[in-house]
Amino acid sequence: MSGGGTPGGRRLGEALVRWFEEHKRALPWRQNRDPYRVWVAEVMLQQTRVDTVAPRYVSFLRRFPSVEALAAAGEDEVLKEWEGLGYYSRARNLRLAAREIVNRYGGRFPDSPEELRRLPGIGRYTAAAVASIAFNRPAAAVDGNVLRVMARLHGIDEPVTRAPVQRRIERLTEALIPPGRAADFTEALMELGALVCTPGQPDCGRCPWRDACTAYLEGRTGELPVRPQRTAPRVVHGAVAVVTANGDGARAGRRVLVVRRPAGGLLAGMWEFPWVETAPDASEAECEAILTRTLRDRYGLDVVVDGGLPAVRHVFSHLEWRLQVFAARVRPGAEAPAGRRELAAQGRAAGEDGDLVWAAPEELDGLAFGRAHRRIADTWRKRRPAP
């Protein structure tokens, strides 16, 4: 296999760019190669499908059209705009990096991978992708798609999850970049992995590298790349309370308690309904009992459980939530815990005053929830009695 900057390696790169010019998809982040647009797209596309990202990318840029706008935004605003995309540390790091770009670089993006990697949340792949696509730097942007393509092209039998193998693939990839065409090559290689050299059964008949591909020539496309077997996500069972506050007349039961997650860890800073882990084999009665006890001990909240709502299951990359959901209300005559009771009337950001909020149904749309608790919120709103 040709490489190391040889004419044969460059010819492969040039053939890929020609293929890309003919077959590339019209995606919103390809309208221009402004570094801010490229950066936002690359971060959004990490571990997220293109068809999911495309409309959200447009919405995000409408809300934050420049790095200055993103830098000036509050964390809650950014998390809310990111809601549903998952991996929320990406959104927090986007905002932190934007502030650094504005404060340290005057709003101008660094154009080298080394400088880009000094920014929060930007690793080897994202730095190389932004440098190559936005600035045409000959940097090898190696993600999961590229690891798969290059392992097949070169017949690499070692696990592509190993750091030395990934560094080797970076060098092999860089050797294929045609002079002056780094941006096109990087996008072309990503496109090849997304459309042709896919997991499982690749469409080798459409591949511009088929005649040079070791895996194709040796009949091993199904064997490569080599990856360790994934471990199953850890299952966490839980009981969730959708607690409504006391009220008079039309206001009764119209406000619901939501709490903010801790500032670090999974879904940091997001909003959710109060919940507690339960035993995998806990009965409905046992779930109700531990939930009411937890609400009393943790929040000073005395509630009556009125029944169940649909259960929710959500799978993260390493974790699976299986949540039983219960409708509850503050016991008549009992005091509700301190917390924001009026959001809209205050004219301020939700949750600004603390970790507990009594939110009206229409105000839930303005809070950033993870997917599981957003489904719970939507279900409760549909099922609650009309005011």
Image (tube, helix red, strand yellow):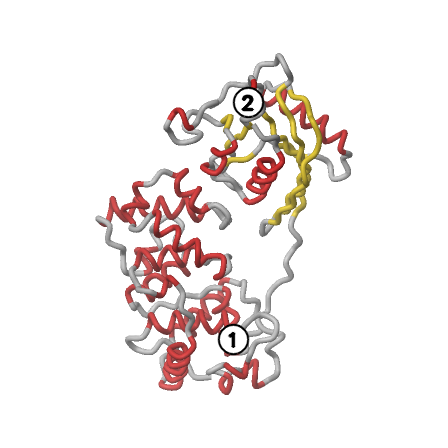
**Vertical relation: 118 (above or below) 2:** above
Q: Amino acid at mark 2?
A: Ala
Q: Is residue 356 visible?
A: no
Residue found at x 44% / y 59%: 54
Question: Is the residue marked by circle 2 packed among few (<14), some (14-19), or many (20+) residues within 10 Å?
Answer: few
User: Is 248 or 284 nearer to us in this picture?
Assistant: 248
User: Is 381 or 123 nearer to us in this picture?
Assistant: 381
Q: Amino acid at mark 1?
A: Val
On the image, the x and y values in percent for residue 153 come to: 51, 78
Q: Which residue is mark 1?
A: 196
Is disc 1 placed on a helix, strand or loop?
loop
**Vertical relation: 55 (above or below) 151:** above
Q: Residue furthest top?
A: 333
Q: Is residue 287 visible?
A: yes
Q: Is residue 310 left or right of residue 95?
A: right
Q: Quadrant of residue 99?
A: top left
On the image, the x and y values in percent for residue 68 come to: 27, 46
On the image, the x and y values in percent for residue 77 come to: 39, 40
Q: Is residue 123 left or right of residue 305?
A: left
Q: Which mark is residue 250?
A: 2
Q: Earlier in the sequence, mark 1 or mark 2?
A: 1
Question: Is the residue marked by circle 1 packed among few (<14), some (14-19), or many (20+) residues within 10 Å?
Answer: some
